[in-house]
Amino acid sequence: MYCINMIDRNNIGFAFPGMESDLGIGATYAGLAGGIFAIGYLFLQVPGGLWAERWSAKKLIGVALIAWGIFAAATGFIQNVTQLLIVRFMIGFVEGCILPAIVLLLKRWFPLDERARANGIWMLSIPFAAMIMSPICGFILTYATWREMFWIEGAFPIIFCIIWMLCITDHPQDAKWLSEEERNYLVNAAAKEESKIATKGMSVMEALKTRNVIILIAIWFLTQTGFAGYSIWLPTMMKDLTGSSQMLVGLLTSVPWFFAMIMLTLNSRHSDKTGERRFHMIVPAVTSALCLLASTLLASSGNVTAAVIALICCGGLIQCYYGIWWAIPTTFLTADVLAVTLGVINAVGNLGGFFGPWLFGYFTTVTGSSLGGMVFLVAASIVAPLLLLFLKKDATKAPSATAAPVSKEA
């Protein structure tokens, strides 16, 4: 499901050259179109958390699948910049409820000492989607128009909704395919975890005022500023560097995401094994930002091969701590406030997804070079993980392993 989400969210990067020709938009408006998704994404974060907790995370995501598929396909019918901005806003709007619902489902299904790995597997969908999206979009655009690309890819979530509704359950105790022993283990592990969380009994407003939550909002804002700028503009940067065809650019653009899948898996597993969270985020995040800066400097000096390698290394590291990131809030937030608080963190934080692409496009237009925009993205990407040093230590440590393993089927 999240793979399809990522494809429909980011495929606009491949459509920019055709849109620029057909709709007459420049880099600034292209960046605005890429970033306005984050504005729409803001609105249903908190309501989505409430609906997931009080109604059904499964059904909420099912409705969102159909809605975003319709708006994604509608992108292929736009005739001007205004319509483009409206459709991109609506895609973000209907997708906004998904992340808090997913994190809530993962909290119900996986004990804390396994959650970074579980989150890491879930977050693999982002680099995997980017990896397969690149050749898929490149292939479609080789034989069809950018409009037809949106029509084809907009059908994916609508079709997948059937699979989602048939296979997912909201709670382990509702899963008939689990044994009674497995169900009891998951239910008891969740109850034991809840009883140890310090924020138990807090209201949502009280939880939002805690230092940890405020810091997490700032971290996610800056993280998404850097990531959105990179992911939206990666196809354009790769094409500018290599001057290759759409097909080859699609293949080259998939390489960073292939390495990202490997690094995300290894980093999440090692974090769960050692119980350390903080530096498993700081080291790859800072290294990724420096690789992005190095790519820009190498490109300006004419060293294209080294610039492409640095750009690939940036992508390989830019997401490898996401599984750990979404495990951290679950260490100090109870289930009754988790979904809504995560909605606020993700809503405010994802505004960085608006500023990243927009400011990158703006500085590229003003300076006539991508260096100015890159410096902004690099600075945001370095400051973000360093803020982890201000979190309370108990929020960045995983507990010792639980007594019994979860069934692999769970």
Image (spheres, grey):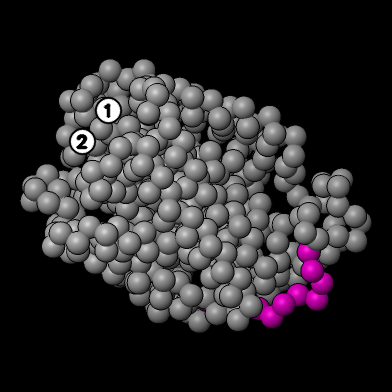
| Magenta span | 394-406
**348 or 114: nearer the viewer:** 114
Number of marks present in the image shown? 2
Q: Amino acid at mark 2?
A: Tyr
Q: Which mark is residue 129?
A: none
Res 296 visible:
no
Tell me if label 2 and label 1 are in contact, CB under 8 Å: no
Res 118 visible:
yes
- Residue 333: image quadrant is bottom right
Q: Quadrant of the N terminus?
A: top right
Q: Residue at label 1?
A: 18
Residue sitting at x 56%, y 69%: 266
Instruction: Point out residue 390 in the picture as x, y percentages from the top left corner.
Output: 39, 78
Q: Which mark is residue 29?
A: 2
Q: Is residue 180 above or below residue 101?
A: below
Instruction: Point out residue 258 in the picture as x, y percentages from the top left corner.
Output: 48, 55
Q: Is residue 133 above or below residue 324?
A: above
Residue sitting at x 37%, y 29%: 141
Magenta stretch: helix, strand or loop mostly: loop
In the image, which is nearer the foreground, mark 2 or mark 1? 1
Left or right of 291 in this view: 208: right
